[in-house]
Amino acid sequence: MNFLIRVVRLIDGLNERVGRFVAWLTTFLVLVVCFDVVTRYLLNESMVAVQELEWHVFAVIFLLGAAYTLKEDGHVRVDVFYSHLTPKKKALIDLVGCLIFLIPFAILVVTTSKAFVQMSWAVHEGSPNPGGLPARYLLKAVIPAGFVLVLLQGIALALRSFLTLVGRPVDAEDVAAADAAGKEVDHA
């Protein structure tokens, strides 16, 4: 069980770091949008590359931030019933949902996007628009990368749910406290 707790901690830590990076990307996106607005409406100048940069950065934020959002339980959920359930019943629903829906879907996206990304890299795909950004293949490579992070976080959620079901719950506070103390979480 301690091994499973370490795996959960490792995946949570990875997605926590990625989430912090994405938070800084949102600040960068705000600056890019402000620049675009100022140049477009005050200077009457519009740049295709800046407009493309806006949606490229937004796509990276969305794709890389999805796993962090899952880690923080921030995805939209219709929890009319879920919110009133016991922790073990919630864990059972989360485990089944991860095993039947989340993990297979993430694997499907990663495997099916492989050829799409490889083709883009092979031709060094760039923007079809004059003045657009080069290296669109880098953006397309973020698709499987983002879903690998979602897959990993889905595995962490499944493991956390399993541990809750067997009476060894791993809460975020337990993991943070163990990290701070530099020792393993032990549930008696």
Image: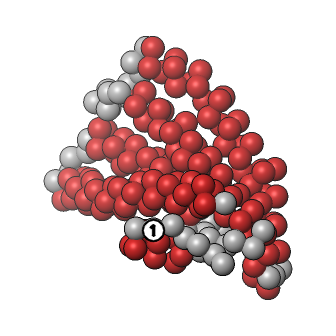
Q: Is residue 62 visible?
A: no
Q: Residue at x 45, y 59 (%)?
A: 13
Residue 16 picture quarter? bottom left
Q: Is residue 101 above or below residue 180?
A: above
What secondary structure is found at the residue carrying circle 1? loop
Badge 1 local density, few (<14 within 10 Å), some, or many (20+)? few
Q: Horizontally, is 12 left or right of 129 in the view? A: right
- Locate residue 99, reporting x and y percent: 78, 51
Locate the N terminus and report the quarter of the image it occupies.
Answer: bottom right
Locate the C terminus and report the quarter of the image it occupies.
Answer: bottom right
Q: Is residue 184 above or below residue 79?
A: above
Q: Horizontally, is 121 left or right of 33 in the view? A: right
Extreme residue in the top direction: 122
Q: Horizontally, is 31 left or right of 18 in the view? A: left
- Locate residue 105, reporting x and y percent: 72, 43
Residue in the foreground of this view, choosing between 9 and 21: 9
Extreme residue in the front direction: 188
Extreme residue in the left direction: 43
Q: Horizontally, is 96 left or right of 38 in the view? A: right
Q: Residue at x 71, y 65 (%)?
A: 163
Q: Is residue 71 visible?
A: yes
Q: Residue at x 81, y 66 (%)?
A: 93
Q: Residue at x 75, y 79 (%)?
A: 87
Residue indicated by mark 1: 183
Query: What is the basis of the colouring in this image?
Result: secondary structure
Q: Amino acid at mark 1?
A: Lys
- Locate residue 89, reporting x and y percent: 82, 74
